[in-house]
């Protein structure tokens, strides 16, 4: 079976497979057990990296959760303080209105007293 790649040179798939097998055989002869050891170490490193990645993702999620809780706490605290301030302002306005009423009442009393003095 012969195919023509983009450059127009015929390539035999069977020869490619044989060449790849020969290269693999030469690689095994030259490096032997070292290649297997390297592959084993690379797999271990890959697993360690995946475990570290998972641990970091877990830490990130924990920090995210803590931040959300802190933001909720701050929001709740701010809402409580705003409510307290609104209540204090309402109380203060009521007192000011009462004081204004007292001034009006005092003015009326002084007028009444002035009229009584004038009549006598």
Image: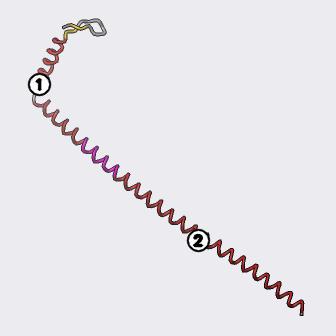
Relative placement, left or right, of 102 versus 69 is right
Residue 90's place in the image compared with 59, above or below, is: below
* Horizontal and vertical percent position of residue 4: 26, 7
Based on the picture, tell me whether residue 50 belongs to the magenta stretch. yes
* Horizontal and vertical percent position of residue 19: 16, 15
Relative placement, left or right, of 115 versus 69 is right
Q: Earlier in the sequence, mark 1 or mark 2?
A: 1
Magenta span of residues: 49-61
Relative placement, left or right, of 76 versus 24 is right
Query: In the rendering, which numbered label is found on residue 28?
Result: 1
Q: Main secondary structure of the magenta part?
A: helix
> How many labels were placed on the picture?
2
The crowd level at tag 2 (other Cα within 10 Å; few <14, some 14-19, many 20+) is few
Q: Secondary structure at mark 2?
A: helix
Q: Residue at x 30, y 49 (%)?
A: 58
Mark whose residue sits in front, 1 or 2: 2
Relative placement, left or right, of 83 versus 95 is left
Q: Residue at x 37, y 54 (%)?
A: 65
Based on the picture, tell me whether residue 81 belongs to the magenta stretch. no
- Nearer to me, 108 or 51: 108
The crowd level at tag 1 (other Cα within 10 Å; few <14, some 14-19, many 20+) is some
Query: In the rendering, which numbered label is found on residue 88?
Result: 2
* Horizontal and vertical percent position of residue 39: 17, 33
Residue 108's place in the image compared with 64, above or below, is: below
Give how far apart the Cα atoms at labels 1 and 2 are: 85 Å
- Nearer to me, 117 or 40: 117
Q: Secondary structure at mark 1?
A: helix
Residue situated furthest bottom in the rendering: 120
Residue 120: image quadrant is bottom right
Q: Residue at x 70, y 78 (%)?
A: 99
Residue 8's place in the image compared with 59, above or below, is: above
* Horizontal and vertical percent position of residue 84: 54, 69
């Amino acid at each position: 079976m012969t195919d023509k790649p983009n450059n127009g040179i015929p390539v035999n798939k069977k020869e490619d497979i044989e060449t790849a097998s020969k290269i693999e055989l030469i690689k095994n002869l030259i490096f032997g057990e070292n290649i297997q050891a390297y592959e084993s170490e690379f797999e271990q490193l890959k697993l360690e990296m995946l475990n570290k990645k998972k641990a970091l993702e877990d830490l990130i999620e924990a920090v995210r959760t803590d931040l959300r809780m802190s933001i909720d706490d701050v929001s709740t605290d701010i809402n409580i303080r705003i409510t307290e301030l609104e209540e204090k302002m309402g109380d203060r306005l009521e007192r000011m209105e009462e004081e204004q009423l007292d001034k009006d009442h005092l003015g009326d009393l002084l007028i009444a007293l002035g009229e009584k003095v004038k009549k006598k």
